[in-house]
Amino acid sequence: MLSNYLKQKLSSPLKIGSLKVKSRVFQSPLSGVTDLVFRRLVRRYAPQSMMYTEMINATEIHYLKQLPKLMEIDKDEQPISIQLFDSRPDFIAEAAQKSVQEGAQTIDINMGCPVNKITKKGGGSSLLRQPDIAQAIVEKVVKSVEVPVTIKTRIGWSDQEINILDFAKRMEDSGAAMITIHGRTRAQGYNGKAKWEWITKVKKILGIPVIANGDIFSVESAIKCLEITGADGVMCSRGTLGYPFLVGEIDYFLRTGIMKISPTPKQRLECAKEHLNNLWEYKGRRGIYQSRKHLAWYCKAFPGAPELRDLVSRIETIDQGNQLLDKAIEFFNKN
């Protein structure tokens, strides 16, 4: 359980520059996942938590005449941040200004994505190897917008190049209002364990809020991470795939000290059905194709889950998906 000191700290609002947020639990930006539909589901259970759009290419915003759908924000969803990536300070600053016009309350700059197609262009975690450029980006964006600018990064490029202490301090000195640290190197990808001890070290040298990310799959893991790191909050990533309840469960515990009862398989499947239908309404046929991975993630830890997972990952129509889920829900109604 949390120490009294952490209980007191985590029960108070978090100040991110000029912005105060009431929850210390964040939903991570996830490419291909955290669209408007997904964020609405997460926010139902965590109404005060900071949400993030999917990562958006600042270069594309510069050349597109119309802003991408990824930037669409519900006028009622607050607090909300738009996450940007690129290696050119001018382009990110321009994209940041457009993001604020769309309703973003903070601008988050991705400096941690390990995917090759991002790093080869100088974005994401490649900026860990280019701290001067990273610093120039933050300074430029801070001067360009009035909302807080935040960073999401990793502890280093590899075990041989862990430079997060120097890098994080440079980001703070450049004007970043908060930093989220995924406790893995770029070389790790999503393998192995998150090295939370590096987040502990960063927290000791920075004055801005430090948010811990990596291996937050349950309330228990969030508590353990906060105890070890002393971080100002936690960010949930893969733990919310097929489980949009997690951010709310952790937030509820931090506020009350009480563990929420986990949703039943039937409730999870009903959420999956809602997710499917909302994607269909929002994106049409493209939403059906995108729903396959989401539905597969929902299908775990209940009788018949592997078989259902195989079927829903191949659906072609909304009716097909609804029929499969209705049949599974009916099973739990009878048992």
Image (spheres, rainbow, N blue to C red):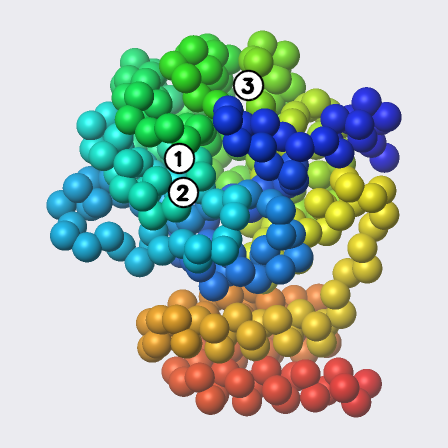
Secondary structure found at label 1: strand
Residue 316: % across, % down: 39, 82
Pointers 2 and 1 in contact (CB under 8 A)? yes
- Pick the front one: 187 or 78: 78
Corner quadrant of residue 118: top left
Question: Distance from label 2 to label 1 (Cα)?
Answer: 7 Å
Is any atom of residue 215 visible in this view?
no
Q: Which mark is residue 104?
A: 2
Position of residue 24 relative to residue 219, above or below, is above
Q: Which mark is residue 107?
A: 1
Marked residue nearer the N-terminal end (2 or 3): 2
> The C terminus appears in which quarter of the rendering?
bottom right
Which residue is at 86% across, 26% downward?
A: 4
Left or right relative to 294: residue 196? right
Residue 19: % across, % down: 53, 31
| Mark closer to the observer (2, 3) | 2
Pointers 1 and 3 in contact (CB under 8 A)? no
The residue singled out by tag 3 in the image is 208
Left or right relative to 242: residue 37? left
| Disc 1 residue type (three-letter) | Ile
Residue 304: % across, % down: 67, 78
Question: Distance from label 1 to label 3 (Cα)?
Answer: 15 Å
Which residue is at 38% across, 14% downward?
A: 174
Neighbor class of circle 3 (other Cα within 10 Å; few <14, some 14-19, many 20+) is some
